[in-house]
Amino acid sequence: MNNSTIRNRVEKWLSNKGHLINKTAFEREIQVTKGVIQKHLKYNKKIKDRDIKALYRLIKKFREI
């Protein structure tokens, strides 16, 4: 799976389910600066590729349940 596909999946998931998650806890879990997810959702700021990959791995953990 290429980076653009992963980015699209993560961004779509965040836009659909971002209101249900604790954004600060997600940021702490993937060890990014505070506010990255909130800025993406509110101001459509781009998330770095390495952070997208970390978010993708974390989201996949939730889908395994």
Image: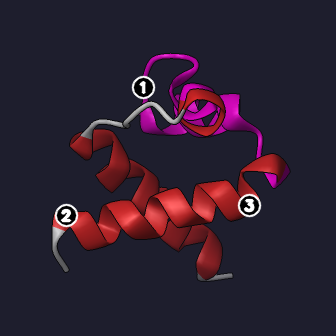
Among the two numbered marks 1 and 3 on one chain, the one whose residue lies closer to the N terminus: 3
Mark linked to residue 32 = 1
What SS does tag 2 mark? Answer: helix
In the image, taking residue 42 as reference, residue 45 lies left or right, namely left
Q: Which residues lie in the magenta part? A: 20-39
Tell me which residue sits at (69%, 81%) in the image.
65
Give the main secondary structure of the magenta stretch: helix
Q: CA distance from mark 3 to mark 2?
A: 21 Å
Q: How many marks?
A: 3
Q: Nearer the viewer, mark 2 or mark 1?
A: 2
Q: Amino acid at mark 1?
A: Val
Q: Residues within 10 Å of mark 3 (few under 14, many from 20)?
A: few
Question: Which residue type carries mark 3?
Answer: Lys
Residue 3 screen position, x and y as percent = 19, 64
Q: CA distance from mark 1 to mark 3?
A: 19 Å
Q: Are marks 3 and 2 in contact (CB under 8 Å)?
A: no
Helix or strand or loop: what does disc 1 sit on? loop
